[in-house]
Every structure is written in structure tokens, then in C-alpha cells.
Amino acid sequence: MEYNNCEKKDIEHFESIVGKQYVSANPAITASYMSKAIMGLEASMGDCVVRPRYTEEVRKVLIWCSDRHIPVTPVSAGLSGGFSCPVTKPGGVVLDMSRFDRIIEIDEDNRYAIIEPGVTNGELWAYMKKNHPKYIPPIADGAPPAATVLGDGIDRGFSLVTSSMGPQGEIFMGAEVVMPVGDILNYGSMALNGTKPFYRWGLGPELFSTLMGSQGTMGIVTKGVVKIFPHPHFKTIKAYAMGNPHDMQDLTLELGKLEFGIAHNTVMVQGGNWPLVMTRWPKDKVPHDYSFYKKIGVPEWWMNWEIWAQTQEELDIVTKTIDKYAEDFKNSDRCRDPDAIKEWKLHPKQIESRMKKPNLIAVPYSYWDAGFLFITWYVPWNESADFAEYYNGKLRKYGFPEVMWIASIERCRQAICMPIVCFDSSKPEDFQRVQDMNRETTEYCIEHGWINYRPDPYIHAPAIYSKAGTYLKYLRKVKEMFDPNYIMHPGRLMLP
Amino acid sequence: MERLRELESEIYKCIHCKACRFAYSGEPDKEGIGLHVGTLGNEVLYEGIVQSCPAGIEYGWEAYWNAGKMWIARAVLEGELDLKTQGQEVADVIFPCITCGLCSSQCENQIPTVEVIEALRAAVVEAGVPLLDKHAWMKNASVTKNNPYGGPKDQRTKWAKDAGFGDIINKKTKIGYYVGCTASYRQMNIAIATVNLMKKLGYAVSIIDEEVCCGSPFFRTGLIDEATRGMKRNLELFKDYEIIMFSCAGCYRTFTIDYPKWTKKPNDFKTIHAMELVSELIRQEKLVLKSHTELDGKIVTYHDPCHTGRHYGEWFKERIIAESTNLMLDMRKVSKVQDEWFEVPRRIIKAAPSVTFNEMYRIKMDSFCCGAGGGVRAQYPDFSIRTAHLRLDEADAVHADIMLTECPFCWRNLDDANTKYEHGMQVMTILEMINKYDLIEKFEKIPIEEALRENHAELHMKDKPRKKK
């Protein structure tokens, strides 16, 4: 596909649409939108940045770019961890959606919020805490305050209630999307003009799924409707220590299956291994030996259950059930290391810290060295231990600390497994090691039917789509229908 | 580029999470004071996390927020931006930054963002990008007159002579008072209040008529040659004093934090801000303040100057990290040191019986800047004053009648915004308030050494002997 760079006439046209002060071709400004961390290690610079404020402005920019074959890479204010969809092929327009920052409506009865793509976790959290304190927005757990609610949602991440309520992708109730040809498409029940966004599946068949995980390749979301959830006041964290990932997986699965009761109260179920603690600090400033972490009470493996309940009684039932199941599991022949199964009594400050939303919990892994990469995979829950063992082996082989984080999605139907690769991103040789490991593990993971979350455009996307066959054929047809000139975020996925 | 390269491993720690744009980025549930509509109609929700990077708020582009600048620095290091050909474009976005350091205080990866920005500015200057006009003017003034205001050299101590303090010039005392350019040529009221107070409390101080600019404006704006020229001269001039006292936050920061970094050795003297001495006298119950009818019922608030507040907080943390062998244990010391440090000015205010002290929402490590620093007041006056106005809005939100601070440069900017945007507030330094309203009821002198940082805030940095089991 041949693309054009932005020329003077293009810049002038964008200025006529959004105003001169909201268009810049300053290379320092385009450089400032780069990100080579967390979810992908490559980024390029666009030719210019355009910052629209209204849907009509987006529409006009896209029509122009489509006619002129100029690539468009949208960015909201940020995804979990930071900017995650930078320009992958040099040039074109970076469409900065951060001025779309309005909270349009909160409907407590129908439990949805209508917001724009630049609304951040921090802003929506503060707004609802003040004005709708009985409800919480579906912000991503672990995503920093500057990440956007819609960005994380459309990226199919996990929210603060994902372990109970399902993946982040399911929070959407509708959206307004500008297509690259200039059409404005409403999804969900909003597709019927004037209808409330109460029914996610719209007029059927439903088209919005084609935007999920699309990495900005299909269209620009200018308004989104997301579910909000009750925010009960009885909350705690229950944590159990385990000696290996299999015990962690199996005990957690038993509790996850207690649906219509216990499992629905466990809004966030997440765990991992002790290097998760160690690598939050500089590598020359903390002990590397497990004995220190053992001494300060950090288990080798653990699982946290964040529990929300309407009453203390309900909360007690859940915590006692977890205790009972842990005890039963410990005494069963399914348990591989009974001695290691014990409650990890958390300090109230640790509980408070873990329940804080939004938080910066995922951020300090750069502190270990100078950069990190989340290589995140979705796997069936009952294969998460195999994943952890396999991946930790590869981290060891390539000389990285064995850092593994695992969370339950929808009551252990799926696991989101996230090895955290801590490395020095200023060193080309480290960068190469990461990429070599990523290639090797990607082949293995795909063979096992595991699915990458937020695919890397150079490793995961080619590997996955090369095996997608008919699915890819139809995905390309969808892409051609929405974006006939392929202007949207070229290079990000294989569309092309 | 050398300094920028030295900081490479710090720059590469940035993951573009953008927590650095907020105050209280780690405290989403912090209770606040709700929505406040400012005098120009702009709304701020003082609850939980609040956007607080002045340049980002003013200009909006990603490049003006700190994270954008970290990625510009990385693009320069990786050759994606060439300062020889694109230096002007880089300069355009990195100079409107007040270097307030809010970003640094929020960074979970502990990136020394202010140092990175200063190094990036120095690299731009080194690449031959023409100096911004006001920065060039300041440099020329400093080269020719030893101060960035262009004040005549022989007028530097005129304020002292006019105030009847001619007897403290060029004297040999234990304490040297480094007045600084702003208090020498602009806010002489602060210099006068400081000397007056020291005289009342019985501490002999000397000033030096050959004193030159501390270099702060030049360290901050990448003009390292001029900064270090002033530094060398001052180190020579003040070498015979045991303790150097300051009333300017910027000068205090520069002498204490910048000088040893650039000379790579400790200073020959100790440094202290005058407020530390007053605060310690109060802590030891040696100084008692009295009421004044003009202050009765007044609500005061306190603006932490970035240079004596957050920059010191970060510096304490940096030292704890550098000295630690197990940071998981030692990091706990940081908040204790910082808490004690930020209590220094507050202790004085709380001891003033006439006034009610209402804290603003963003304070201490999360304080919102006054907008004056980093070469911004000179080069971008409108942005600078608008930032001070936003700070005064915050003071309005807690019904303050008096905005206290402890820096002449903050004073200047806040007072200008107070006038321009009609906030109707009174701006003064704490020591000025004590002096102006004659608030000293009684006092008893203590050795000044007891007020040094090492005897209050820095005490918490030392390891306590571990109990044997």
C-alpha cells in the first residue's frame, strides 16, 4: 500500500478544520507521542498531530486523509500503562483524542456512563466518587490514572470487576464511531436514533465487535457507553500463599466455579510469584534471593481475592468459604504442596493499597533496570499454571527475572497471564534478547491455542494472523468495507 | 549532550504512563474540597487526582507534559530528533516548563525529571540553537552585572544601606546571608525582613557586596557556563563563613543541591533557610509569637515554593536511594524526612495566634507551582502569571485572606497575579509577616547549628540501631 506524507496543503486543511492552534508539525511534538515500552517496543513519528474536539472535525479529517491516502493513527489520552498504540509506519497524522474529555451522562438506573474517548480513569473516578458515590466506573485495574476508560475497554483489557463481571470488552453498551470514509455509525441500541444505550447487541447482527481489539485500525470512537457498577462498602482482600502455580490455579478454579454466590463477590482475583515484589525496586538495591522475601512474609506464589459485598455478613460468608475451600484443598490429593498453603495475612495498609483504584501498581517495573514489557496472553484458566511454568523457564533461559502475574477473568473461565520482562531498554543487546524470547514463546503459545492480548505488530500479529485462515479473509473484507483506502493505523495489524 | 547521555538509563525508565501530570496520582480517593470555580470561570475539582503540570495545562500538547518531554529526550538520544537541524522546534516545547518537579514527585520509576529537562535544555543550547530572547538578555545582564535583572553592581547592597543595615556589609561573622538577586533588586522587603528578624533574635549575619547571582536561572535554562561561573565566584566569596543563610528558595536550592553536584564535592559551609531557624526556635519553645489586631480573624494559607519544598523532598529521597543497600526497607524513611521538612514553615504559621491556617488542596510534594521558575517568568510572562492565578484560585477555594510563601520569586509572581486577576489577597512571606506585625512575644537564642537540617528533617535519614533479638 502506498501512502502519502502530510504536505503543507494537508496541514493547512487540518488547521481549517480544528483551528491553527490544534495542528502541529513540530517534530518534537510528534516525537512526544512515542512509546516503546509496556505493550510494544517499536514506534515511529507521525508527520503531524491533530487534536480535534468534535465528531464533525474527526469526520472531516478522516475524509480528507482517506482521499489523500494519508495514514491516521488515533491515540486517546493513554491505555493501561501508557501510550500503547503509537505510529508503527512512519508518517501520517497522529489523531490525538485527548480533547474529547467530556463526561456526558451517568445513568444510575440503567447503570451506564456516556463518555468521550479522552476521559481518563482518574477523572471519571473522581467525578463519580463525588457525584455518584454508589457506583464505580469500569476502569482498568492496574491502569494508571491517565489511561482512558474507552481505550482500555476497546483494547479488551480487564477492569476492576473483571474477575466477577467478565472482560473489559463486555463493558460496552454502545458507541458512536466515525468511519474512515466519513460515515458516523452508532452501535448498540443507539443505532436506532434517539434510543437509550440500554441494549448492547443493538439491531442485530451487531457490528461493534469488529472494533474490539482493532488497535485503531477500523474507525475512531468519538463517544462510548460503558457499564457502571455498584460500589458496596463492605470490602476486603483475602490472600493465600501457595508453593507453585498449579496449586494457585486449582484452588482458585474451585472458588471460581462457585457462581451465583461466592465467585460473583470476588471482583478481582489476581496473583503471581515473589519476583513481582522484587522487580519493583532497582536491581542493585534489593536482595535477589527468595530467603529475604520469605522472611518478610512474601509467599513464593499467591492469589488475592478482592471481595465486595453488600453486608458484613455477606463478606464474612465469602471469606469463610475461601478459608474452607483452602483448607479442603490443602488436605486433598489434588494439592501438590500442602505445607505451603496458608493464609497470607495482609496488613490493613496492604489491603488498602491493593483496593486503591486507579493505581500505579503496574508502573514501577522500569525501576528494576530501565524498561519493561508486558507480554500478555489469554489462556483457559486451567492452563494458566502450565503457561506460567513454561514462560518462567523462558525468562530464565534468556536471563530475565521470572516475573509472572495472573488474573482471573469471569470467574476463572479465562486467565490473563502476564510475564513482565524487566530489561534495560537503552541497550540494543537487551532489546534483541527480548525480541528473540518473544518470537520463540509466541510460536509455542500459538501452538497451544493461547491468544495474545494487544498483539505486537511485528511478532504477535503476523504469527497469529498467518494461522487465522478464513477468519483473516473476512476480517480483511470488514476492513475494506470500513476503510477502503487502508488509512487507519497501517502496520498495526495484518489488515494489511 | 554529555549530561543527557549520563541520564540515559533514567530517561529510558519512562513508560509514558503519564502519572506525572497529576498531583496525588497515587491517591484517587483523597478527600478534597470539591469543585471550585475560579475568578475567570475555570473549574477545578479539588478531589482525588488533579491535573497539575502547569505547562501541560497551559499548552495541552503531549510535548508540554513531562512524559512527552521524556520521550523527546529519548528521541534526541536515539537520533530521531537532530538538535543541529531540529533544535529550535525542540526548544519551542521544552522551555515553557517551570521545572517545578511535580512530575518527578509522582514518578513511580523515580525519574529525576527536572534534571532530564535541564540536561535537554543544555543540549539544545550546546547545539547552537539561538537563546530565547529573554534568556539571552538575562545571560548578558549576568555576565556584565552579575545579576539577571541588570541591576547595577554597586547597587546590590543599596537596600541594606537604605534600611540602616550598612554595618552588616562585608563583615566577618559566623553566618553569611546570601541575599540573592531578587531580594537585592526587586523584593527588598524580604531581605529587610530577614535581616531585621535576625537582629531581633540576636543572630549576627553579614552580606557581601560582591555577591553574584547564584546561577539558578542559568542551571534551570541550560546555560551551564554562566551558571557555573557564578557558582565558582560565590563559593570563593562565601568560603570563610561557617553557615550561609538564605531567604530565597531558589538560591537555597542552588547552593545546597546544585553546587555539590557540579563541583562533585561537598560545600565548605553549611546552608540554612532563615525559616528553619525560626521554626526550630518555635519547636524548642524558645520563640513565642503574639497576636496582632490587623491579623485577627484572618485566614492564611501557605504556598510551598518548589525550590524549598518539593525539590528538597526529592533530594532527600535521592540521597536515601543512593545510600541504600535494601531499598524495600529504606524507602520507608522518605516520607518521614519529607513530613518533617514540610512541617518547618507550617510550624511557624501554626504558632501565630491571630490567624487561622487553612491548607490548600495541593500542598507539599503535590503542591501546585506559582509559575515563576525555570526561566518561564522572564520568557513566557502570560503563562507564568496565569499559573500564579490558578494557584490563587486554589487559595480562594480555602477562603484565604493572606497567601504566605517563603520565596521572593514566588512572592513576586503571586503578587502580580493577585493584582492582575483581582484576587484581593495579601501576599507575603512568613518572616515578613512576623517582622511587619512585630509578632515576637519573647525569645531565647539557641545555637544556630541546632536548626540545621541535619538536626531536624535529616535525622530521619539515619539508621536507628537495630534491636537485637
Image: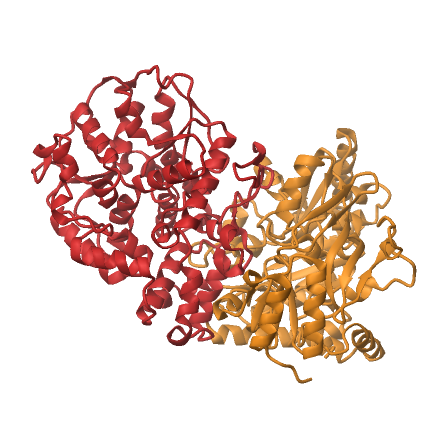
Chain colours: A orange, B red
In this rendering, would B412 be left or right of B212?
right
> Residue B469 in the image: x percent, y percent?
42, 36
Q: Identify the residue shown where x is 33% and y is 16%.
A: B292
Viewer-proximal residue among A394 and A408: A408
Q: Is residue A483 above or below residue B446?
A: below
Viewer-proximal residue among B251 and B412: B412
In this rendering, would A304 be left or right of B299?
right
> Residue B10 in the image: x percent, y percent?
43, 61
- Furthest residue toward bottom: A2
Q: Is residue B60 visible?
A: yes
| Number of numbered tags placed on the structure image | 0
- Furthest residue toward right: A204
In this rendering, would B436 be left or right of B58?
left
Quadrant containing the C terminus of chain A in the rendered view: bottom right
Quadrant containing the N terminus of chain A in the rendered view: bottom right
Q: Is residue A135 above or below residue B373?
A: above
Q: Quadrant of residue A334?
A: bottom right
> Residue A78 in the image: x percent, y percent?
61, 58
Q: Identify the residue shown where x is 25% and y is 41%.
A: B186
Q: Is residue B108 visible?
A: no
Q: Identify the residue shown where x is 79% and y is 77%.
A: A480
> Residue A340 in the image: x percent, y percent?
65, 49
Q: Quadrant of residue A156?
A: bottom right
Q: Quadrant of residue A314?
A: top right
